[in-house]
Image (cartoon, rainbow, N blue to C red):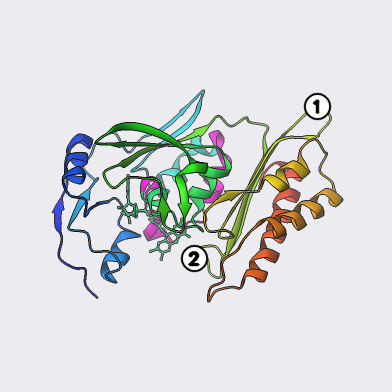
């Protein structure tokens, strides 16, 4: 099918882009087009106008500093993949993004597009929630910064207002000796995951878990942390028994969707397996 007719604008500044969105509630932002174009082609979305961000300056930066990593909204998967400093500054992010889609899509898909699209199985929203990231937005009412845990409200649904543009994802500082892992399972390389797990923790001097963060994708109606699993891990040294307990708790904590790719029971079992494998990998070498 072909998209319904729409006007097209490519403003040069963020201010102009916001003016266009504020003047027309039926207008939509387009970035890489990798999620939006299929929706338009199937006429699942029919915006009156596309406001293309490609000429807006200042949204394409990757900044690494003492407070963490900032990813501009127009940073593409490929930019993340190719940034060697980012691999050191945030290895969990880099590992997760390697699982996103295929080469062609990674060449165009963007940080802002993925966050705004809010697919429950998408990797970046999962990393944002797991890592306590914040999402910066700017609209007609001004700027605001929303914790990722509050940003995603359901499948393809967020707290973003129609006239707001995501400008940046802010990930907190990542200590070098942190233990971490990312595990997902997809039917084919590059497909959306049936389920995925991102986790990390620090250790005290006696090797006991501090500050555990365990997040899931594809296993609930939005990316979520699993506080039940984190409490189980906190204060204990990782061993086989604890890993098995955590995996069982994770399977209970998720609320997986049923669809033609997998039933809820399968996804629960998958989450348990991924948590087990992730914790084992993190405890053995700190790397996935
Ligand atoms: C075959 C296929 C496989 C894929 N597999 C995966 C996968 O495994 N994992 C994964 O995470 N993704 C996957 N994707 C999605 C892909 O990563 C998209 O690129 C991404 O989700 C959206 O980014 P985009 O820049 O293309 O956004 P667009 O398609 O341009 O926009 C998507 C949505 O975001 C809005 N938007 C875009 N930028 C902004 C902004 N800065 N502020 C506010 N709103 C904005 C648009 O209005 C639209 O609603 C896949 C896509 C395809 C086609």
Mark 2 and ligand 1: say if the CB distance to the nearest ligand atom is below 8 Å.
Answer: yes
Q: Is the magenta stretch mostly helix, strand or loop?
A: helix
> Does label 2 or label 1 sit earlier along the sequence?
2
Q: Is residue 235 magenta?
A: no
Quickly name the residue at label 1.
Answer: 205
Quickly name the residue at label 2.
Answer: 191
Which residue is more in the foreground, 11 or 258?
258
**Residue in the picture at 58% in, 43% down:** 130
Which residue is more in the foreground, 184 or 244?
244
Q: Is mark 2 on a helix, strand or loop?
A: loop
Q: Position of residue 114 (x, y in %)?
A: 41, 51
Question: Can residue 97 be seen by looking at this rendering?
Answer: no
Residue 258, by quadrant, is bottom right
Q: What element carries label 1?
A: loop
Which residue is more in the foreground, 260 or 82?
260
Query: Callout 2 environment at 10 Å: few (<14), some (14 to 19), or many (20+)?
Result: some
Question: Can residue 256 be seen by looking at this rendering?
Answer: yes
On screen, residue 96 versus residue 278, left or right, reads left
Q: In which quarter of the image is ligand 1?
A: bottom left
Magenta residues, start to end: 88-112
């Amino acid at each position: 099918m072909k998209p319904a007719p729409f006007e097209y604008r490519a403003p040069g500044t963020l201010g102009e882009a916001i003016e266009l969105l504020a003047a027309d509630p039926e207008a939509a932002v387009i970035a890489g087009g990798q999620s939006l174009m299929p929706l338009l082609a199937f006429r699942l979305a029919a915006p009156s106008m596309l406001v293309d961000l490609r000429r807006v300056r200042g949204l394409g930066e990757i900044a690494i500093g003492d407070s963490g990593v900032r990813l501009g909204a127009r940073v593409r998967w490929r930019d993340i993949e190719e940034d060697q400093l980012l691999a050191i500054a945030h290895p969990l992010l880099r590992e997760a993004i390697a699982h996103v889609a295929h080469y062609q899509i990674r060449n165009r898909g963007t940080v802002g597009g993925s966050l705004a699209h809010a697919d429950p199985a998408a990797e970046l929203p999962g990393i944002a929630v797991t890592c306590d990231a914040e999402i910066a937005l700017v609209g007609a009412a001004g700027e605001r910064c929303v914790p990722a845990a509050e940003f995603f409200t359901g499948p393809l649904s967020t707290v973003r207002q129609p006239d707001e543009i995501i400008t940046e994802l802010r990930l907190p500082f990542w200590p070098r000796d942190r233990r971490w892992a990312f595990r997902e399972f997809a039917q084919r390389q590059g497909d959306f995951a049936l389920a995925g797990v991102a986790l990390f923790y620090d250790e005290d001097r006696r090797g006991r878990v501090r500050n555990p963060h365990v997040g899931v994708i594809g296993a609930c109606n939005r990316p979520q942390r699993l506080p039940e699993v984190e409490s189980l891990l906190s204060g204990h040294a990782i061993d086989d028994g604890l890993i098995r307990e955590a995996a069982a708790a994770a399977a209970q904590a998720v609320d997986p969707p049923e669809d033609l790719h997998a039933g809820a029971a399968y996804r629960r079992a998958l989450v348990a397996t991924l948590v087990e494998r992730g914790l084992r990998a993190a405890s053995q070498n700190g790397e996935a």
